[in-house]
Amino acid sequence: MSDTVSEIERLFGEYGRSNYDEGVTLEQHCLQTAALAVSDGASTELIIAALLHDVGHFLQAQARGNENYLAIDWAHDTVAADWLRPRFGDEVADPVGHHVSAKRWLCARESAYFDALSAASVASLAAQGGPFTDAEAAAWKAQPGTDDAVRLRRWDDDGKVDGVTVDPLSAYLDLLVRSSIDRTP
């Protein structure tokens, strides 16, 4: 097994059981998000992005202790993308790095989207800067790869259901091993 995959297993084991403030743990949330990507027929890279989109929370908990991601924006999306890029490449890292911005874009562009957000997502949105202005939304959407970030965001929003049974992390390990480029320094 690769060092990257062993590290992912360790991070999920140590930090995945923390409460996501949605009635699910961070691990359950990540696994539900990945399951939604699988059921939507997403690419391998986008499934991995869905599974690991919140790994930045784990990395920040490791570095800072228990983070309060609802009150303070520690840029978990950027932290995750920076960590994922040398391990899985741009096709995994880019949607992860944009999934918070995708929420801000959706809030600015779809009036019903904000109303459907969970309480935790509304709280974190405030810490993340709130909905984009029209100019911010247009500039963000003009970047390459934002369509995948929006898909990831929608799975992220739907992956917060208490009591849903999904495949465990172990079901994704072979996929992670095959996809890891492991170019970490």
Image (cartoon, helix red, strand yellow):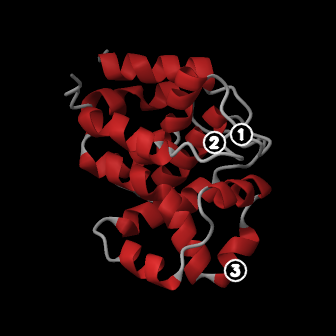
Q: Position of residue 53 (x, y in %)?
A: 48, 44
Q: Which image quadrant is residue 177 in?
A: top left
The residue that mark 2 highlights is 29
What secondary structure is marked by label 2?
A: helix
Quadrant (top left, top right, bottom left, bottom right) of the C terminus: top left
Q: Residues within 10 Å of mark 2 (few under 14, many from 20)?
A: many
Question: Residue at label 3?
Answer: 112
Give the residue type that dot 2 points to.
His
What x and y, as percent, mark residue 90?
25, 48
Q: Is label 3 in a helix, a strand or a loop?
A: helix
Q: Which residue is mark 1?
A: 20
Residue 62 drawn above or below residue 74: above
Q: In front: 158, or 83? A: 83
Answer yes or no: is residue 179 visible: no
Amino acid at circle 3: Ala
Q: Is residue 158 left or right of residue 149?
A: right
